[in-house]
């Protein structure tokens, strides 16, 4: 069993879409980045890469590569999951926290979790996403940016477990 943690921050600016966990949220500001700047999925990618010992998102998808300009971070998450699989690991669970003063994210969290579970090809019960404010303190509290934290547990399955999961997903 191995554990990884991830952390990411993106700036909130006018003229960009706000995409979190693959959900486009109606808000007057959006996150700035080379990709769609989905800070939650980036933190999750880093947690997964950390768990398997493969560095970080910037190493695999550099922002110097035009391929990733404006890309959907769900594609990056699916690629990271392929790397996890190639190393012989299955996902145990993911837990993540979005630090965001505004907008209210609670109504969108079930869809974010469903997107992440689908991209990771695991049951919904293995994914948890939370949101918190910082009570108006710091850069998140001033609405200058959004941060996300994630942890991920991965494990090498027994042959029986591997067959069971394959049957469940087929
Ligand atoms: N952007 C956010 C932040 C928080 N929530 C929900 O509100 C609850 C209370 O947040 P506090 O920071 O005051 O502890 C939190 O547990 C979330 O359910 C939210 O929906 N969107
Ligand atoms: C995802 C990548 C690549 O498009 O760009 P950004 O959207 O800027 O995101 P960041 O969290 O800075 O890190 C990784 C980048 O390489």
Image (spheres, rainbow, N blue to C red):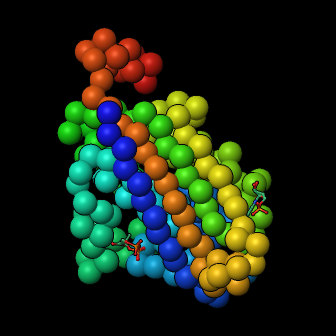
| Position of residue 91 in the picture relative to residue 85 (left or right) | right
- Counting labels gives 0
Quarter of the image containing the N terminus?
top left
Vertical relation: 156 (above or below) 133: above
Q: Is residue 134 above or below residue 87?
A: below
Task: Classify residue 68 as left or right of residue 109.
Answer: left
Does any portion of residue 40 appear in the rendered image? yes
State the residue at coordinates (53%, 30%): 123
36 above or below 113? below
Whole-percent x and y of residue 69? Answer: 37, 76
Whether residue 119 appears in this view of the structure is: no
Q: Residue 153's x, y, as percent? A: 40, 40
Residue located 70% across and 71% down the image: 134
Left-right relation of 59 to 128: left
Q: Is residue 163 left or right of residue 98?
A: left
Residue 114 position (above or below residue 138): above
Quarter residue 62 falls in: bottom left
Quadrant of the rendered image holding ligand 2: bottom left
Residue 54 percent across, percent down from the top left: 23, 54
Name the residue at 21% across, 39% down: 86
Where does the C terminus fall, quadrant-wise? top left
Looking at the image, which residue is at 58% across and 66% down? 19
The single residue placed furthest to the bottom in the displayed view is 14
């Amino acid at each position: 069993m191995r554990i990884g943690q991830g952390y990411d921050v993106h700036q909130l600016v006018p003229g960009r879409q706000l995409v979190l966990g693959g959900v486009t949220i109606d808000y007057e500001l959006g996150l700035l980045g080379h990709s769609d700047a989905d800070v939650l999925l980036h933190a999750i990618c880093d947690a997964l890469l950390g768990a398997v010992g493969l560095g970080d998102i910037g190493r695999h998808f550099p922002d110097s590569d035009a391929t990733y300009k404006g890309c959907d971070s769900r594609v990056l998450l699916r690629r990271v999951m392929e790397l996890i699989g190639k190393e012989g690991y299955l996902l145990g669970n993911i837990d993540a926290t979005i630090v965001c003063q505004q907008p209210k994210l609670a109504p969108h969290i079930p869809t974010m979790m469903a997107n992440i579970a689908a991209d990771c090809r695991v049951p919904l019960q293995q994914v948890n996403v939370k949101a918190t404010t910082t009570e108006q303190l710091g850069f998140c509290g001033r609405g200058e940016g959004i941060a996300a934290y994630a942890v991920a547990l991965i494990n090498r399955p027994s042959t029986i477990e591997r067959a069971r999961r394959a049957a469940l997903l087929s």
